[in-house]
Image (cartoon, grey):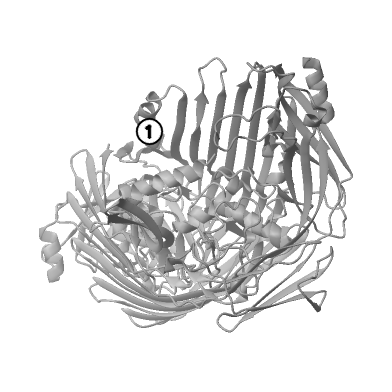
Amino acid sequence: MMKKSVILILMLLAALILHAQKVTVHAVDAPASAVFRTIIEQTGKNFVYSSDLLDGIRVNIVAKNRPLKKVLDDMFRDTDITFSIKGKNVILKRRKSAPAPQRRETAQKARIEPEIIYAEPSTLLEEVVVVSRLGSPAVETADMGAKIVTASDVRNTPVLFGESDVLKTICKQPGVTEGTEGLAGMYVHGGNSDENMFMLDNVPLYQVNHFAGLFSAFNPDVIRYIDFFKTSVPAKYDGRLSSFLDVRLNNGDPEGHHGSARLGLTSGAFNISGPIGSRTTYVAGIRRSWYDVLSIPLLALVNHKSDDEKVRFRYSFIDLNAKVNHRFSQKLNGFVSVYYGNDVLKTGSEFKNFNPSGSYEKDHYDFSWGNLVVQAGLNQRFSSVLTAEYTAAYTRYFSMLKSDYALRESNGDAVTETQSVTHTDNNINDWIFRGDFDWTPREDSRVRFGAGYIRHSFLPERTSRHYTFNDTKIETRDSTMSYGANELNAYIEDDWKISPHFRTNIGFHASLFNIDGKTRTGLSPRLSFSYRPSDNLAFKAAYVRTVQYVHQLSKSYLSLPTDQWIPITRRFKPQTADKVAVGAFWQSADRVFTASVEGYYKFMHNLIEYSDEYYLKPPFELWDARLTSGHGTAKGVDFQIEMTRGKFSGQVSYSLGWSDRTFAEKNGGKTYPARFDNRHTINIQATWNPSARVSLSAAWTGHSGNRFTLLPQMFDSPTFGGQNFYPTDGSPLRAPINNYQLPFYHRLDLSCNVKNSRGFWTFGLYNAYCHMNTIAIRRGWRDIIEYTPAGAHMTSEPVFQKVKLLPVIPSISYTWQF
Amino acid sequence: MAILKRLIIMFMPVLLAGCYEDFTPKTFTTPVLCLNSLITAGQPIVVNVSHTWLYSDGNTNSEHKVSDATVTVYANGKIVDSGYLPAQGDKIKIEAESPTYGKADAEVTVPRAVIPVKLRVHPELTAAHKAESDEPLEMSANISFNISFEMDLADDTEVVNYYKVSHTGFFHSGNLYDEDDPWGWPSPPYSDFNPGSLKYEAEPIFSEHIGVFESIMGGDSYGFTFFTDRQFSGSEYTLHLRFLDCSYMVRSEKWDEEFLDCGYVITLHTVSKSYYDWANYLWQRDNGPLEEMGQIGLGEPLWGYSNVSTGAGVVAAEASVSFTVNLDEFLGKAISELK
C-alpha cells in the first residue's frame, strides 16, 4: 500500500516566483508516481506513460526551486526512461536503445500510447493502476493487511446487477467474508458486520447500504481510491474492532471540465468536475436508482384492474457527493465536501368502496433513512517536514418510519372512523473536530499525531403512537431516552526505518468516552514490525488493540432502517479486540508476482448481542435490557498471490479461519461458532485487457457454508395461550446456535468493459453458471398426490428444504464520458 | 399491515425462483420429554407428558404421548397426590421420568389473583328498531350498540404481574336452532347476543410487546390481550376494553323479561411469567416477522419457548377474577323506547 509504504516527505513549498516550471521536491526512496503527484500539484502538468514503465522505479531527490526539466533529468538519470515536456503533458518513454526485459517488450508491442494519463487530481479511473504496480508496499512497509483498492479495481469487479460496489469489491480480499448473498454484510477476520468503520474522506458513515444492502452508499463514479486496513491499523483510526475502510473522493480537475453519465439497469449516475478560476476546483456526483420509475407502469397495470383498491409503492435511493477544493496559498489548501444519501420507501394501499356507504381504508407506510456528511478541512504546510490537516465535520444518520392506518366504516346511520399513526425516529448526530499532523524529523522516520473531539448525540429509538376512534384520542410516546456523549481522542505513531532491513511502526491511540454520567477509557497500542532480509522478502509481526463505543443492533441479516446504532451505556463496557498477527510477504524481482501469508489470532471482549429469546422482553424497557455481553475469538491464516503482467492481472487468495462466540445469555452460556465461521474461503479474480478498448474480468468465490441454527426437533405445543391457531403443529425445540453448516458456497461472476469514443459499455453476468447457493434450511411441506380408483388424494408431509438464492443475473450499463 | 414483510416476501420469490429443494440434513437428535400443564388455582393439576420428534418424521399430527413416564408433583417442596388443589402463591414443581426419554422438570408459582379496583361500563346505543315479522310477536327487536369497559387496576410494587383479559357473552337463548335446518332461525321465543369485536388498538398496553421492527413488519395486537404491569408498577392503570358492533336480538310472542338476562363476563387472569412468555412467543410465531425471516435465512430462527428443563413444553399457572356485567337495564331501556 503505497500511502503507507513510502518514506517520502513531499513538500509543496512556495510557488516559484519567476517561473512556474520550477519545483520543489523532497523524496527519499519514494515511488516515482508519488513525486509526480507533487510536481502536478505545483505545475499542473500531466504525466503520460505506459502502465508498466515505472515498475520498480524508486526515487531519491531533494530539489528546491529547481526547473522541472532539471528535476526530471535527475530523477531518471540512471534509468532507461526518457521524457519530453509537451505543453501540459510530460511524456515518459523507455529509451529505444535500452535492452528491456522480455515481458516489457511484449507489453510495449501492444501498447498504444499514451496508454495511461497520470493526472492528479483527476476523475480518470486508470490513474491509480500505476500505483499498484510499484514496488509492493506489502514488502516495503511494516503494515499488515493493508490495501489500497483503486476505483478501477471497483469497476473491474463483477457484481450483482452490474452496479460496481465498493463493499463487494473489498469482500474479495482474503479474510473478508460477504454477508447474505447479494445483500448486506461484510465480516472481517471473524468479526461482526458492525465492527467495520466506513469513512468518507476520514469521516465516519453509519449507514452504508441501500435497499437492504443490495448496493453500498458509495458512488463508485466519484471515488479516487479506498484505504482498507484489516490487520495493522494506523493509530489515527479507532472506534471499530475489525477493520477500517476510508473511501477517498476525487478532487476536481484543474485542467478542464470533465464528467460522465452512466445508465444501468437499476440506477443512473452523473458526475462532473473542473476548475473554478485558477485556484478552485469542484467535483460533484449524483447517483439515483430507477426502481420507482420502473414500477410506475407496473403499478398502473395493477391499479387499473381495480377501481376500489389502489396499491402504492415507491422505492428510490439517491447519493449526492460534492466537493470544492481551494488553494489559498502554496502553504494552505482547503476543501468543503458534502455527502447526502437517502433511501425512500413508500408503500401501502387505499381501499375505497364506491357504494353509498362509502367505506374507506388507508394503509400507508413511509420510510426514509440515510446519511448526511458535511465537512470542511484545511491542509497547511508549516515547513518541508511538517504538515497539518484540520477538519470539522458533521455526520448524521437518520431513520424515520411512519405508518398511517385509517378506516372509515358506516353501518346504517352509524359512522365509525379509526386512525392509527405510528412515528418512529432513530438518529445519530456527530460533530467532529480534528487536527492531524505529519512530521518528518529525519529521513528514516515519519511521525503522525493528532487529536480530536466528537460530540455524539444518539437517539436509539423514539416512537409515538396516535390512535383516534371517533372522538376518542389516545397518544402514547415511548420513554426511550436520547444520549449525549463526548469523545476525546489523541494518537501518535512513528513509522521508523531502523535500518535497511528493519522497520517498525509504533503507535498509540487513546480515547475517553463520556456517556450516562460515566467516562470510559480506551487505550489502543499499535505495533508492527518488519524484517526484510532481501529486497523482495519481508517477515512481519503486528499487535493491534481496538476499542468500539457504539454498536449496531439488527434483528435481521438485512440492512434495514430499523437497525439501530446505539452507544455503550453504564451497563456495558466498551467492546475491545486484541489481535496479534505474523506474516511473510514476497515480491518477485520483476515485480510481476507478489505473495503473502498472514496468520492472526484475535480476542474480542465485551461483545454485545441480543440475548436468546430477547423478543420476550418488552421493547419499551430500556433497549439494553435485551442485550447480553460476551467474548469471542477468531483465528486463521490468509494466503494471497497477486500477479500484474502486461494486459493481465489477477489474484488468488485462500483463507483458513475459525471464529466463535461466548455469551452469558446466549446458547446457555456455551461457546458456539460464529455465523461466518467459514473454514475455507477461496477467491480467484482475473482481469485481462486484450486491447485498449476491451477489459474482461472474472471472479470466482467459494467458501465453506455459513453456520445456521437448524431446529430439527419439535415438541407438542401446549393448547393454551393467546392465538394458538395451530396447536397440533408442534413447536421447534431449541438447539445449539449455529449447529449446522450449510453446503459449500460457490459462484462465478463475469464482466466486460468495452470502450468506444464516447464512453464504455459494461456487461455483467452474476452467478454465471447459475449455481443457486443455499442460504438457509427451512421447515417446509411436501405435497404428495396419490391416485386411487376413487380419484386423486393429496396429503402433505413435513420435510426440510434448502432455501436457495439468486440464479444467473445478467446486467448491462453504459457510461458516457465527456 | 405487513409492508416490509410483504416486500421481502414479494422480493424474495422473484430472486429465488424455484429455490426450495427437499433434503434430509445429516443431524443427530435424541428425543426428550416434553411437559405441558396449565395449573389453575383451585383446580386439579393435569400434566401432558409427551416426547419430541424429528420434524421430518412425518407424524406431526400423530400421538407423541409417553406412557411409561412417572410424574411427581411437588407443592411448596412437598410431594402431593392427585387430589391436591393448588392455591394461589403455591410453588409447584413437576418432575417426570421415563426409561425411554429420560427426565424433565419445571417449576412455576401460582400467581395471586389481582382484584380490579373498579369496573365501569359505558354502553352506547347505535341503532334500535323493531323487526318486521309475519308472525304475531309481542316483542321483535334488534338493538345495536358499542360498549366500553374501564377497569382500574392497582398494582403491587412488590410483585411483577402478568395479565390476560378475556371475555365471553351470555344471554337467555330460549328456543335453539333447529338442527335439521341449520340455516334457519329458531322458532320464537328466542334471543341472540353478539358481544361484538374487541378493538385491540383502543388499549395501547395490548401492544406493549410490539417493537418498531415488528410493527413495520406488519405485527399488530389483534387477538392479543396479555400485558404486564411494567408500565404501571406500583401505581394505578385503567384498562380500556372497547367492543364495537355488538348486537342483541329478541323474538317472542309474549314478552318475558328473562330475555334481558344478557351481558358479558370479563375475566382478569393473573398468569405466570411462563404463560405470558409462551403467549408472546406464539404472537411472534404467528404475527411477528422473526419466524418467517428465520425460515428463509434472513434472521435467526425462532424456537418454541419453554420453561421445562429439556426445552420442550410449558408449565404455566394462572388465577383469575371474573366480573359479570348484565346489560338488562340498558337493553330494557332501549326496548322500552321501542314499544
Residue situated furthest right in the rendering: B117
Q: Residue at x 77, y 52 (%)?
A: B269
Locate residue A578 relative to residue A457 in the image: left or right. left
> Is disc 1 placed on a helix, strand or loop?
helix
Task: Measuring from the top left, give residue B245's x and y in whole percent.
Answer: 67, 29
Image quadrant where residue A170 sits: bottom left
Question: Which one is nearer the viewer's eye here, A115 or B95?
Answer: B95
Image quadrant where residue A260 sits: top left
Question: Which one is nearer the viewer's eye here, A508 or A542?
Answer: A542
Q: How many numbered discs, if any?
A: 1
The subunit letter for the residue under badge 1 reads A
Is residue A97 something that shows in the picture?
yes
Question: Which one is nearer the viewer's eye here, B218 or A247?
Answer: B218
Does residue A245 lie above or below A318 as drawn? below
Task: Measuring from the top left, give residue A383's x and y in whole percent.
Answer: 52, 58
State the residue position of label 1: A295
